[in-house]
Image: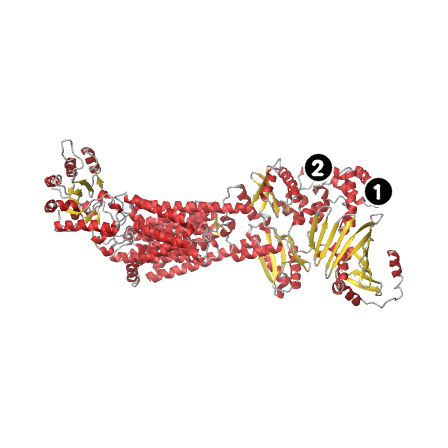
Amino acid sequence: MLAALMAAAAFGPPPAAGAELDVETLMRSLAQVGSHTASFVERKHLAILNAPLESSGTLVYTAPGRLEKHTLVPRAESLVLDGDRLTLEDKGRDQKRTFALQEQPVIQAFVEGVRSTLAGDLATLSRFYQVALDGNERRWRLLLRPREQPMQDFVSEIRISGSRDRIRAIEIVETGGDRSVMTITGNGA
Amino acid sequence: MTRWALAGWLAFVTACGAVIARTEFSADISAFLPRSPTPGQRVLVEQLRDGVVSRLILIGIEGAAPEALAQASKRLAAELRRSEQFVSVANGEDAGLPGDREFVWRYRYLLSPAVTPGRFSARGLRERLEENLQLLGSSTGPVVRRMLPRDPTGELLELIEPLEGQGRPATREGVWFARDGARALLVAQSRAAGYDIDAQERALAAIRSAFERAAGGSGAVLLLAGPGVFSVSARAAIRGDVVLFSLIASALIAGLLFALFRSPRAVGLALLPVATGAAAGVAAVSLGFGTVHGITLGFGVTLIGEGVDYAIYLFTHSAPGVPPRAALGRIWPTLRLGVLTSILGFSAMLFSGFTGLAQLGLFSISGLVVAVAATRWVLPALLPPGFAPKVAGAFVPAAMALEGRAPRLRYPLLAAVTLAAALLVAQRGPLWSEELSSLSPVPRSDQLLDQRLRRDIGAPDVRYLVVVRERDEEAVLQGAEAVAAALRSAVRRGLLEGYDSPSTWLPSRAAQAARQAALPAPGTLRKNLAQAQRGLPYRAGTFEPFLEDAAAAKKLPLIDHAALRGTGLALKVETLLVRREDGWRALLPLRGVVDAAELAREIGAVAGTQAALLDLKRESDELYGGYRREAVVYSLAGAAAIITLLLVTLRSPRRVYDAVAPLAAAVVVVTCLLALVGHTLSIFHLVGLLLVVAVGSNYSLFFDRQALSGGDRGRTLVSLIFAAVTTMVGFGLLSFSSVPVLKAIGSTVGLGALLALSFSAILQRRDTGAAGDARAWRPAPALELTLMLHAAGALVLVLRPELWPWVLAAVAANHLLLAAAVLWPRGQALGPNLNRLPAPAAGRNEVCLTFDDGPDPDVTPRVLDLLDRHQAKASFFCVGEQAQSCPHLVKEIARRGHSVENHSQRHSPAFAFYGPWRLKREVEAAQSVIAGLTSRPPAFFRAPAGFRGPLLDPVLARCGLRYVSWTRRGFDAVDGDVQRVAARLTRDLAAGDVLVLHDRAYRRWPAGEPAVLAVLAAVLERIAAAGLRCVSLPAACGRGPAA
């Protein structure tokens, strides 16, 4: 279903059911969103595996810069990004590690785009990524390409699609071909 | 003689010069650390000298905007990494040594402790693959995905995980920063060990020049801290101090000498013994210790101040017409005694466990001995005939005036000492510093900077270490592995945060071989993997790289030191794995220890190896405590030795007391002043106090010499004052040094020497000769001390009431001692006490017979007759009441030419306990009774049974009476055996003896004859046989009619 949406988007913007959108306006409206909770389902397509991996859980966003991803299935863990600090907790092994986001460039490459978008922080987003937008207010899609190393080593493109001021899906394309697609529901979109 | 002396001196100086030319000078801080006895202390010292910690240089950059600081940090790090002097430079950039990563990756199957046969069985592999599936889906998926094809069992993670517990500083702009963003931080590890100060200096210079290039104009400031930095700056400070202070001291002292003598030749000659002594001191230390420490040279400055004293004494006593040799003859005994006490003081340092202090002791002793010897034998030979530098005129009268007025300050001084003692006892804060760091030669500001940088970086304070001891390298690595396994489990249970071990990067051959064997053969591994993969979604062929690596690992040569070369891990292993004469040691530093006691138990329980948990802080505190105890013991021993020497030489406790009292007062006052200024006292202050006693004794002894005429006394005074001033200059200059050793000793002795001289002048006892002069009376030592102790005790109670048990104990002890003094009839403690005739009387072969408790109508007339028969004159100590009942007898005694003296009015057994008014009544009553009967009032007094109370002395002084005890008594009042009594009285009979008998019939022969008469007859015969004359006391003491 999602793939179809993506394909449709690739052939051009849908008939303009709403006003034309530019990045600044989108960012502003996203910035105004306060805290909310949603559920996610994530599918990872890895080259070394011949079947996708699926995980699900909840996402909690607290303006302006706190993002929590609590995975329940298949392995309980949580990732909390608060400003500059990243906390990974592996509930199965009862391990908790905290570090600065810059120390884990791999994770930063993945997470920075999502967090900045949720916060409506165009400045940070532009610093790390080339930003392109297509779609309209009802259905938009942000395309982010990392500008510099080391993020370029890991991620080739991040595609965030949503409707109005809510995000619906996040797709991350890694260098090397691996892909992960996260669908977000229950956040009022 | 002259030629021999000169030749000898030249030869000696040449020999010293030869030794000095080949001497090595060092500024190694660890010379002031112990010749360590315990293994724990040895580890501590090793760590401080060349452990990992000693190679760290902490770098801070501050003073600009964070972006500029970050730039500077990156550029500086890049340049330093290119330099050969640094093994690693960490600043937060992930530019860790590629060598390290490659090494770990290449040898991961030999390094990882998780490599066991089970891990590579089909089931083991399946478990890992399943877990990896989950991890791939998690947030760390991307990280895992990259390693998976080559390392599905996750050995890399196993190896890296323990390292994660390390404290990391905050990061900004990609580099390490202090939390408040004001400072960028770097940690450099030098290739050279901490004790190689030259190499450390080069490394620091490299950092500074690299910083100039990296951030020259941006206004940023470079901060450096760390053991290497300390060593370098300490050495520079010591060097600077030595040169500067020697120059200043020499200049000042030369100036003083010139002001005193107004003759350049005198100045030059006076400095000769000093120079010789200094050369001898350096040579002696070089021969005795192998190297000379810079601090020892710094201490040499004090030698300049002291060594010049002897020449001053010599010159001031050489008047025209008094050749130097004669002057020397006069002052030599006192000089020699002064030198001996100084030597005893420095000897205490010689025996201490500190190499550094022992060097100071040896230096000072050799320097002093040679300086005195040069003054004694070489200077007179070098002085031109008739050489008598005139002491500049104004000094003598000024000195005499000062000295004349000094005794007025006696009571203020005693009050000050009492106050100082009370303040010291009542001191609320700790008086003594508790820590080894107080001995560190590093200035406080540098220590604070180091602490700040360390906190910012999160560099661990290495406090806990596990030490494993074995005979050879393989055994010690195996032991370390066993301990590491126990530590891993302890980490999991939260007993500590993390640890480091040499066996992590250089496992024992046994462990490596076991791991290599645990890897299955390639074919088996492929089969196991295929089985494990069944049903899991991994694409075929994903793990080919893993199979290749595993096969290669089976053929890898085992890791040894060569394999580590070129990586930063090599240095780490080198410092954690040390070789000593008695075997090998592995050190495992621990981080974040939560429960040391439990950990120690668990480590002790590790089987098969000798491992122990070391608490470096506790070791160093105990070390310091040990030193302090030792220092106290040696200082007390030194003081005791000095007092013993004085007792042996001066032979009179009273004279020793007079010599030592000003020194004790100086010590108390100096300690109190130091405490008030806020210094906590260290071992070096203690040493300084001992030196105050040693050096100050030179001054107080001079005041003991009473047989000095006016001119001599003036010259002696001037020489003393100048000697004290030069000593004060020498030591006082050191108190400006930044080296704590020198500063402590300098300030203590500089002040103490001056006080010792002043107090000696103030407290001096002047024998006025006429003891009947009531104005000149001064309380006896025991009385003074008692009053002072009670006053101090009262003050202490006011300031700190909770100390009352101690005050009570002190007062009780005081009274016990007083009681003991009362029971010692011949002692001087309670006041002047004539217990033998003065020297002139002894010279005339005179002895004195005294008779107590008379007059008695039965015995006295017969005694008088007996005395007449032998033409002997005696003194009769009469009891007032008895005199009143037999007044004619008293008159008869006086008529026959004997003297009548005072033995109290009623002869009460409780006389010693009377209060002052009752004493006064007793003494004065008897005085007036006897004076009424004879033409002259008594001049002497003896207490009933010889027990004088402490309060008697002032009463006697008021009445103009002099106290007399005896040299010999017969106990004729209790013993009826005539021969025995007579023997007691006349054993070792000598001129100047005072004998006591009783002209009362205490004992009678069976026939009723008083025994004393027979005794007296026997005694008189023996006196005559010995060629001695019996005279009365007044005659013997030069007062009253000749016998």
Please state the horizontal and vertical placement of residue B73, each as a whole percent of the image: 65, 59
Please state the horizontal and vertical placement of residue B467, each as a whole percent of the image: 59, 42
Do the residues marked 2 and 1 share a common chain?
Answer: yes
Q: CA distance from mark 2 to mark 1?
A: 32 Å
Label 2 vs label 1, nearer the camera:
1
- B668 or B185, which lies in front? B668
**Quarter of the view holding residue A69:** bottom right
Task: Describe residue B196's horizontal placement relative to residue B956 as left or right.
Answer: right
Please state the horizontal and vertical placement of residue B709, each as a whole percent of the image: 24, 55
Asked which secondary structure carries label 1, the reply is loop
Task: Describe residue A140's horizontal placement relative to residue B112 as left or right.
Answer: right
Please state the horizontal and vertical placement of residue B4, each as a whole percent of the image: 34, 48
Mark 2, other Cα within 10 Å: few <14 / some 14–19 / many ≥20:
some
| Residue named by callout 1 | B535
Task: Describe residue B995's horizontal placement relative to residue B183 as left or right.
Answer: left
Kindly tell me whether residue B87 is visible in this rendering. Answer: yes
Asked which secondary structure carries label 2, the reply is helix
Q: Is residue A154 above or below residue B635?
A: below
Circle 1 chain: B
Q: Residue furthest top?
A: B1006
Circle 2 chain: B
Which disc number belongs to residue B526?
none
Kindly tell me whether residue B966 is visible in this rendering. Answer: no
The type of residue carrying mark 2 is Ala
Name which residue lies at 45% across and 45% down. B629
| Residue named by callout 2 | B514
The type of residue carrying mark 1 is Gly
Q: Is residue A136 above or below residue B432?
A: below
